[in-house]
Amino acid sequence: GAWGSTNPAPAAPLVQKSEVSHTSKAISFAHDWVAQRAHPIQASSLSYPNGVQVQLSELSSLVPTLSASNISQASRIRTGLDNGELLWRTLQTYRECDCDGNGFLSWNNGEVRNFLTLVFRQQGLAPPMENEMYELYRRFDVGRNSILDAGECIFVVDALLRAIASVEARPSPG
């Protein structure tokens, strides 16, 4: 009798259900955005659904090491962005990285860094330097709450990949 009446187990699913609802919405939004592939690969500026605006020329200058380390892969990245394959894989990686299922990744506990590193390594690319990750993370953390939801994580990867793809695509000076 006494064990059954004090067992906290029934309360746990209620908390998980609300977290699952938030997580489902965040994943669903990211899934829909990836499915739409909103920006043509040759766009010079991007507008993301969370209000973040990115100029690719400016972005490339913010991530010089990333761009230089992966320039030989720019054509493959353009193809993967164009056919959606890279962002579908990124969404799958996000799901793997959101181990606690709370619908977001945190900068402070290393989840965002681990996610970005894993995405790039899975694609056979050199990952961004931590300072490059932080620059993009700051731009996309519009709530200034040290977390990125599923959509924001996908947007960061999209922006980083487009920065690499745009380097080779731009004519060289002279």
Image (spheres, rainbow, N blue to C red):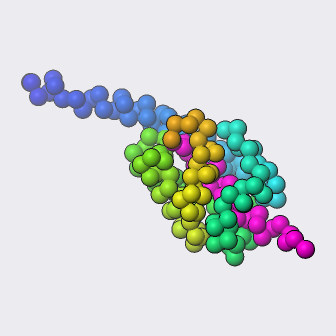
Q: Pick out the residue farthest to the right.
A: 174
* Residue nearest the viewer, comparing 164 with 21: 164
Q: Is residue 97 left or right of residue 7?
A: right
Q: Position of residue 137 (x, y in %)?
A: 58, 49
Position of 108 relative to 65 (above/below): above
Q: Position of residue 152 (x, y in %)?
A: 60, 45
Q: In the rendered image, which quarter contains the C terminus?
A: bottom right
Q: Position of residue 47 (x, y in %)?
A: 75, 44
Secondary structure character of the magenta stretch overall: helix
Task: Point out the stretch of residues depicted in magenta.
Answer: 147-174
- Quadrant in which residue 12 is drawn: top left
Position of 34 relative to 102 (above/below): below
* Residue nearest the viewer, comparing 32 with 54: 54
Q: Can residue 24 be seen in the rendering of this structure?
A: no
Q: Pick out the residue farthest to the bottom.
A: 72
Position of 44 relative to 14 (above/below): below
| Residue at 56% from the left image edge and 37% from the top image edge | 144
- Quadrant in which residue 120 is drawn: bottom right
Queried whether the magenta region covers residue 158, the answer comes back as yes
| Residue at 50% from the left image edge and 52% from the top image edge | 112
